[in-house]
């Protein structure tokens, strides 16, 4: 019972809600009320005419219940008693009110209005003892609580009219529906018309039919405008006519499907080839695919892991293949190529965006590029093999010089000694300790004397090695002592001091000492053997070159101005010219006229060495940037030929006195011997052919061969290296 | 002095070129229209020799067109059509904006159109010119014909492309001009010889495309517009050369069905062609003639490669491609009725010789034992080898031999995959049994390589000699030391070794040295070129050597 009571209470409140929301309508109302009843006697199957609809609505209610119970549980429990009371009170009067309410909608006549509160939620009155006012303005009191749930239950059990009893909320009374009313409710629930006699299936009377009627539908007389021509239409038409006349509107185009209609375009091959077509460069075709692209390539064409990693790292433009070769075991496994549209598109772009240029691709045979030179065999003699090695020095051998007779070889080393060797036997004949790293040695080219100039620190020593005929020795001694007998050396030069060797030094063969103000780098003899020039490279002063005259013991500085760091110097073998190589150029001075005659541009960064052809018209010059330049003095001041044979800095160059040979020594440890014929005919250029690369020195401290010189008469070449040896190549 | 000062950039190459923007202004076209015009007319930029001069002293990167080309474009009637179209679009927009639907309809009806016939004729004055340029057209049309109707381009275009490609394939079948087929990872390459021109095209595999976003479909569509026109005219001409009617009547779904009556015509044609070639050949010298004749014979044999064979395609193999290839070589082909219409016989047909199948296992019913069940690669390999290859390697479930590209022609010194050697042996008519010989050949090759290596080593020979000398010297030194120390020498006379002088080797060495010296004397420019060539050669040799080692 309690439960049922609770449910009804719930229903009530729900109904009230509905009322509040003004969705209460007449048609539904009886059903709702019936449902209430149904619910109250839910356990029993005493459903009557409302049964079928009830079952539907019950389900709905049930679901509603659940929802509401969830949300309103607390409230309900708290106000349970209250609610019950209220309901009880209400019930008495509601039935009357219901009647009234019912007729409110009926606009006809409101006979049964007992409660005048109007269409309001009745719960507004729940706290009052009355539920409204009657027509006279008297309060209608709620019925005294006489019906509780037990009563209700009993009523349900005993009252046969219970199922058709409806509670009127407004009046709080129960109304028993008559048979007619029940019937009406049933009909309405079934969706039928309320009027039993109404026939919904009457045949339709077609008013507007396809038959033309003789009488008008309306009786309205026709307008005037339907008899006179329309002005607006006329205006429009005239506009169109005008537009057609003016050609603004064209008649509708005939549907012409020009596309896809083909004919023999080249029927008349009139060969009208314009100049354009001759100029036209057809786009190159797409290269055909190789084995790489196969869906099942041979395994060697697949990428290894490294290749794949490389491929992924590389920029797409650098890749050798634009795709990764893949192998599929069968055709059905081959997927779609994702880049297909891309590739087509790229091709399209290439076709209309790429500049085209005719490139003459000459298929060069690399062998044809090699110049046809005379065979080295035909240019013999030249040194080919290393035949002797002169050992004895303990430091790197900076400079070597061969005596004019070709019998003796002098070498100066960093270990502070000058050694004299017999050329043919490689025997060291003599060792002179000079006490300092020897920078340069030079044998006097005059065959009638036997003197050696040695440059170390700031001194130039003149040695008389006494390795010759007595006569020669005597003549050299005479040369040295000649001026002694004459007047005293002029001391006016100031900075250069000539002095004679004494004591022990004299025994060693030392004769003269020429003291310079700065460190001397190189010393060279004039061809006659009387003059001697020395270099003191110094960027800051004009005192860089001295020319000494041995017979008079006189020194002079030929240059009054500093023209750059002097690297090396040389006398012209025949004429009174003097070659001075600064860092980047070679200047040629006429010693007689005392003026510069030529300046050679070497095109190299730093000249290391220089040699003058015995004819005197050609100069070769080696530089630290691996180049060897050959100058033809008659031709130009620019090099006739630049030879880039060496891999490292060129340290020394030399001409052979008799044979058309020259050699260059470099830090890469090689000596390259070249054939260089010079023709007397001025129109014919020198012929330069490399004939042999000689190797024999060991690289030490990144230095290879330091100096190179030819034998005066034989086609032999000597080279001194940083490995403290001297080699003879024959 | 005197005279007018010469102004810069008013003569010479500066006046022969025009930048793209200036060209566009001269033609009064928007950039897309200019682009379309260039595509249709085949105008491409040129690279001037002296870019700075042409660019009036500036080095900014610019595209240059020949002024003559642009002047030529000025008279193009299509430019007028472009302008008309522009106006049409403007009017249409306006009508839409005003919601004047009748005006929209009227405008749409009067949409300006243009034809490209005259452009085709102008660009390709002779038919052979057109045929030479048809590769790209075919590739593009085959691609477009596989597009889904998703609005990337007009449906009509797709249909037209499909129609044209089918017509082309039909022609190739009818004229039996297919030469090579290659299954690549990109698609299937076909090469046909049409009127003496080798024409290659690629067909993507039958999958739906995922359309990339960074592709301008307008450009592609413009190209396709041109290409469809070109292909149509070319097809017309080709069909008429075979005495066939163009357009052919094809099945509604565009299935490639050769018409039966065409065969006779074709046969006649080919014979006449042969006779002509005989006549021409008479004038040439014998050897060449024989070679040509042999080639022709081979070609004829290839054309009849599949004649008399009856194929049946299972549903999982690429039907269109296979049917095309089989028909090109005179085979009969059919497939399951449910796959596509046009199947002529059933699986149960007893006369079927080959069933093409591409399945992992043999779970299917076998109908007759007189039938090979082979994988599709067999067909393609047969076409490329020009002979019927042994079927054993291509049976179901067998690991397939590698599929080689028929387009690679190995030159002297290139790496030849062993599979290719095998195939060549088969072509020569040798049995695959004597594999040992091949190995020997390979060994010989290796031997040659070794020799080459030796040659290279010769270059370093001098150093070796030096080393020997050094060793000798050491020995001598030792002895000297011992002598100087005054010890009693255990004197021992060792018999001197006779140095065998290899004359040939010496000569080689000499030559190598000569060459090295001559190389030293090369001019800088030539040296650079020489080094480059030699670098390329060496790399190639290296690659060839490393390739088979994997």
Image: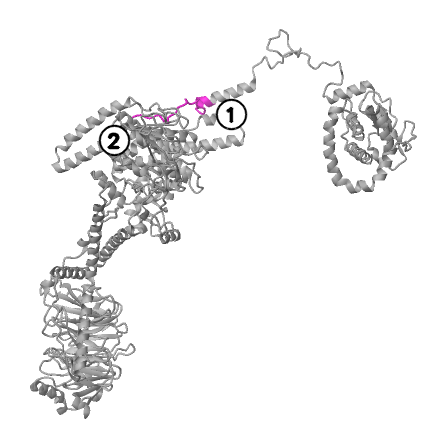
Cα distance, mark 1 to mark 2? Answer: 60 Å
Q: Which residue is mark 2?
A: B303
* A474 with respect to A32 (left or right): left
- Front residue of B66 and A106: A106
Q: Which residue is mark 1?
A: B102
Q: Chain letter of disc 2?
A: B
- Front residue of A461 and B341: B341
Q: Residue A35's image quarter?
A: top right
Q: Can you give x and y, in whole percent of width and height, for residue B154 in the image?
A: 43, 32
From where the camera sits, is residue A504 visible? Answer: yes
Whether the magenta-drawn stretch holds residue A149 is answered as no
Q: Chain letter of disc 1?
A: B
Circle 1/circle 2 CB separation < 8 Å: no
* A397 with respect to A615 (left or right): right
Which type of secondary structure does the marked residue at label 2 adopt?
A: helix
The stretch of residues the image draws in magenta is A243-265
Quadrant housing the N terminus of chain A = top right
Residue at the front extreme of this rendering: B369
Task: Judge whether B458 appears above or below B115 on screen.
Answer: below
Q: What is the number of the mark on residue B58? A: none
The answer to whether tags 1 and 2 share a subunit is yes
Q: Residue A469's image quarter?
A: bottom left
From where the camera sits, is residue B180 visible? Answer: no
């Amino acid at each position: 019972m309690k439960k049922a009571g609770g449910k009804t209470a719930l229903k009530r409140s729900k109904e009230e809600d509905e009322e509040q929301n003004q969705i209460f309508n007449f048609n539904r109302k009886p059903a709702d009320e019936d449902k209430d009843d149904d619910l109250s006697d839910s356990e029993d199957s005493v459903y009557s005419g409302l049964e079928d609809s009830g079952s539907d609505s019950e389900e709905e209610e049930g679901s509603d219940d659940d929802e509401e119970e969830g949300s309103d549980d607390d409230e309900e429990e708290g106000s349970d008693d209250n609610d019950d009371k209220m309901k009880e009170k209400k019930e008495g009067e509601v039935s009357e009110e219901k009647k009234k309410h019912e007729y409110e909608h009926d606009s006809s006549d409101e006979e049964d209005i007992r409660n005048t509160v109007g269409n309001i939620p009745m719960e507004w009155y729940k706290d009052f003892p009355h539920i409204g006012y009657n027509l006279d303005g008297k309060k209608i009191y709620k019925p005294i609580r006489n019906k509780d749930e037990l009563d209700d239950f009993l009523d349900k059990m005993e009252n046969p009219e219970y199922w058709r009893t409806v509670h009127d909320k407004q009046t709080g009374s129960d109304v028993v529906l008559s048979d007619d009313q029940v019937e009406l409710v049933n009909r309405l629930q079934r969706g039928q018309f309320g009027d039993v006699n109404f026939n919904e299936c009457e045949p339709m009377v077609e008013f507007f039919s396809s038959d033309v009627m003789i009488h008008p539908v309306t009786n309205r007389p026709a307008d005037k405008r339907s008899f006179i021509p329309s002005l607006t239409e006329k205006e429009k038409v005239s506009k169109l006519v005008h537009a057609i006349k003016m050609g603004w509107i064209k008649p509708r185009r005939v549907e012409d499907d020009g596309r896809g209609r083909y004919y023999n375009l080249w029927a008349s091959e009139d060969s009208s080839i314009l100049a354009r077509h001759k100029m036209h460069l057809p786009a190159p075709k797409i290269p055909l695919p190789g084995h790489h692209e196969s869906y099942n390539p041979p395994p060697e064409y697949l990428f290894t892991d490294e290749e794949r990693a490389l491929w992924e790292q590389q920029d797409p433009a650098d890749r050798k293949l634009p795709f990764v070769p893949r192998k599929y075991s069968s055709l059905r496994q081959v997927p779609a190529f994702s880049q297909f549209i891309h590739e087509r598109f790229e091709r399209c772009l290439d076709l209309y965006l790429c500049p085209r240029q005719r490139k003459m691709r000459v298929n060069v045979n690399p062998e044809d590029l090699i110049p046809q030179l005379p065979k080295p065999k035909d240019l013999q003699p030249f040194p080919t093999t290393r035949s002797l090695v002169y050992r004895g020095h303990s430091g790197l051998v900076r400079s070597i010089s061969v005596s004019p007779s070709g019998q003796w070889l002098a070498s100066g080393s960093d270990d502070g000694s000058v050694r004299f060797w017999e050329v043919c036997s490689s025997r060291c004949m003599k060792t002179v300790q000079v006490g300092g790293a020897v920078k340069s040695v030079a044998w006097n080219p005059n065959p009638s004397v036997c003197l050696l100039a040695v440059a170390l620190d700031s001194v130039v020593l003149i040695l008389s090695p006494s390795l010759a005929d007595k006569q020669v020795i005597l003549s050299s001694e005479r040369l040295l002592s000649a001026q002694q007998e004459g007047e005293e050396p002029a001391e006016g030069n100031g900075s250069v001091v000539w002095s004679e060797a004494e004591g022990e030094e004299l025994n060693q063969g030392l004769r003269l000492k020429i003291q310079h103000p700065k460190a001397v780098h190189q010393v060279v003899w004039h061809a006659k053997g009387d003059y001697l020039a020395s270099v003191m490279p110094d960027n800051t002063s004009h005192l860089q070159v001295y020319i000494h005259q041995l017979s008079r013991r006189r020194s002079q500085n030929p240059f009054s101005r500093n023209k750059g760091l002097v690297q090396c110097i040389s006398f012209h073998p025949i004429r009174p010219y003097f070659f001075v190589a600064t860092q980047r150029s070679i200047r040629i001075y006429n010693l007689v006229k005392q003026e510069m005659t030529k300046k050679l541009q070497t095109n190299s960064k730093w000249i290391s060495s220089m040699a003058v052809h015995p004819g005197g018209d050609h100069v070769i010059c080696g530089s630290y940037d691996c180049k060897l330049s050959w100058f033809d003095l008659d031709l130009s001041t620019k090099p006739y030929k630049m030879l880039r044979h060496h891999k490292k800095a060129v340290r020394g160059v030399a001409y052979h006195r008799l044979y058309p040979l020259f050699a260059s020594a470099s830090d890469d440890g090689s000596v390259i011997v070249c054939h260089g014929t010079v023709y007397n005919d001025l129109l014919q250029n020198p012929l330069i052919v490399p004939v042999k690369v000689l190797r024999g020195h060991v690289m030490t401290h990144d230095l290879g061969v330091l100096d190179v010189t030819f034998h005066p008469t034989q086609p032999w070449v000597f080279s001194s290296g940083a490995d403290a040896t001297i080699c003879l190549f024959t | 002095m005197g005279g007018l000062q010469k102004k810069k950039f008013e003569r010479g190459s500066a006046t022969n070129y025009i930048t793209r923007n200036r060209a566009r202004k001269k033609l009064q076209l928007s950039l897309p229209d200019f682009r379309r015009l260039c595509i249709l007319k085949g105008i491409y930029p040129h690279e001037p020799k002296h870019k700075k001069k042409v660019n009036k002293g500036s080095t900014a990167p610019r595209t240059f067109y020949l002024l003559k080309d642009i002047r030529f474009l000025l008279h193009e009637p299509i430019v007028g059509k472009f302008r008309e179209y522009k106006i049409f679009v403007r009017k249409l927009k306006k009508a839409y904006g005003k919601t004047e639907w009748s005006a929209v309809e009227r405008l749409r009806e009067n949409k300006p159109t243009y034809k490209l016939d005259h452009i085709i004729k102008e660009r390709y004055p002779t038919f052979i010119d057109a045929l030479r340029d048809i590769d790209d057209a075919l590739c593009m049309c085959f691609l477009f014909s596989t597009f889904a109707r998703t609005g990337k381009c007009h449906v009509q275009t797709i249909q037209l492309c499909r129609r044209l490609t089918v017509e082309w394939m039909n022609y190739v079948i009818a004229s039996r001009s297919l030469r090579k087929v290659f299954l690549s990872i990109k698609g299937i390459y076909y090469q046909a010889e049409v009127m003496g021109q080798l024409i290659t095209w690629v067909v993507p595999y039958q999958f739906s495309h995922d359309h990339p976003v960074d592709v301008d479909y307008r450009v592609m569509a413009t190209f396709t517009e041109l290409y469809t026109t070109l292909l149509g005219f070319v097809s017309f001409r080709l069909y008429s050369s075979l005495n066939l009617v163009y357009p052919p009547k094809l099945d509604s779904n565009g299935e490639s069905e050769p018409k039966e009556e065409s065969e006779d015509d074709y046969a006649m044609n080919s014979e006449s062609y042969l006779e002509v070639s005989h006549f021409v050949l008479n004038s040439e010298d014998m050897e060449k003639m024989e070679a040509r004749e042999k080639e022709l014979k081979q070609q004829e044999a290839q054309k009849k490669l599949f004649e008399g064979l009856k194929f049946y395609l299972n549903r999982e193999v690429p039907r269109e491609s296979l049917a095309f290839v089989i028909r090109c070589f005179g085979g009969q082909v059919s497939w399951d009725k449910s796959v596509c219409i046009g199947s002529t016989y059933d699986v149960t047909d007893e006369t079927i010789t080959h069933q093409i199948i591409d399945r992992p296992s043999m779970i299917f019913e076998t109908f007759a034992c007189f039938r090979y069940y082979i994988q599709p690669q067999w067909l393609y390999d047969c076409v490329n080898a020009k002979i019927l290859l042994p079927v054993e390697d291509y049976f179901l479930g067998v690991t397939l031999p590698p599929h080689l590209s028929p387009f690679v022609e190995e030159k002297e010194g290139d790496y030849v995959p062993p599979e290719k050697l095998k195939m060549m042996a088969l072509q020569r008519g040798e049995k695959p049994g004597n594999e040992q010989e091949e190995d020997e050949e390979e060994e010989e090759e290796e031997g040659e390589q070794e020799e080459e290596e030796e040659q290279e080593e010769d270059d370093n020979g001098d150093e070796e000699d030096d080393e020997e000398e050094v060793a000798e010297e050491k020995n001598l030194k030792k002895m000297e030391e011992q002598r100087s120390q005054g010890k009693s020498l255990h004197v021992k006379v060792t018999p001197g070794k006779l140095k065998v002088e290899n004359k040939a080797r010496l000569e080689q060495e000499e030559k190598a040295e000569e060459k090295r010296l001559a190389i030293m004397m090369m001019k800088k420019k030539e040296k650079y070129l020489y080094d480059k060539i030699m670098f390329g050669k060496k790399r190639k040799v290296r690659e060839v050597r490393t390739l088979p080692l994997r």
